[in-house]
Amino acid sequence: MDPQERLHRYIDDAIAMEAGLLPALKDMADEATTDADRQMFLEHRDVTQRHHDRLVARLREMGKEPSYLKGVVNKLGIMGSELVNVVREKEEKAVRNLITAYGAEHVEVASYIALEAAASAVGDTVTAELAHSIRTEEEAMIHRLDARLRSLPSVVMQPMTI
């Protein structure tokens, strides 16, 4: 595979990653226990949609189309992890969603670091700048999620009553 094809694959992987997060973020917003968390997840979904659209536009500028099969596979993987969590109580589920989103953001940041480096290596400054811009927004979301995780109310840690 030549470097340009590899770059196309990296962009396509990023598109699939963003597409896979969209339904999960909507579910997280629906399951949020506070208005602030609900709003954060809805804003995150909007930003994720913009990232997806910008990446699709860039791939098409390069004469390629996204592989939507990857997005379906990612969605199924996220849905599978949700099934494991179906029996959790509401507050615990809210904490789990924050942890899941926090982890997903770190994977996204790593992906955009790799995409930026790959684009720079082949002299594609447009894609490198796009990856850098998206990574900056992903890092900002990490800081929001980090602050929220650190401020969780202690009520979540109280013993359950039946």
Image (cartoon, rainbow, N blue to C red):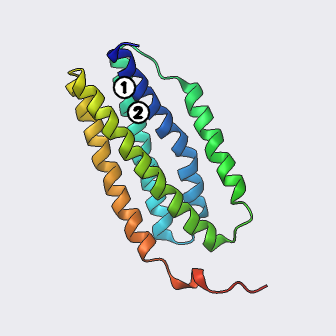
Which residue: 51% across, 37% down?
Answer: 19
Q: Residue at x 48, y 23 (%)?
A: 66
- Number of residues whose C-alpha sits closer than 10 Å to that of mark 1, classed few (under 14), some (14–19) or many (20 or more): some
Residue 78 appears in the rendering: yes
Decide which of 10, 31 is in the foreground and name it: 10
Looking at the image, do the residues carrying marks 1 and 2 touch, with CB atoms under 8 Å apart?
Answer: yes
Q: Position of residue 68 (x, y in %)?
A: 55, 26
Q: Amino acid at mark 2?
A: Asp
Query: In this view of the protein, can residue 32 be seen by the observer?
Result: no
Q: Secondary structure at mark 2?
A: helix
Residue at 45% x, 58% y is 102
What amino acid is at disc 1? Answer: Ala
Q: CA distance from mark 1 to mark 2?
A: 6 Å
To which residue does mark 1 refer?
57
Work out which residue is located at the far front of the displayed protein and give it: 1
| Placement of the N terminus among the 4 image quadrants | top left
Closest to the observer: 2 or 81? 2
Mark number displayed over residue 53: 2
Q: What x and y, as percent, mark residue 136? A: 28, 48
The answer to which quarter of the image holds residue 130 is top left
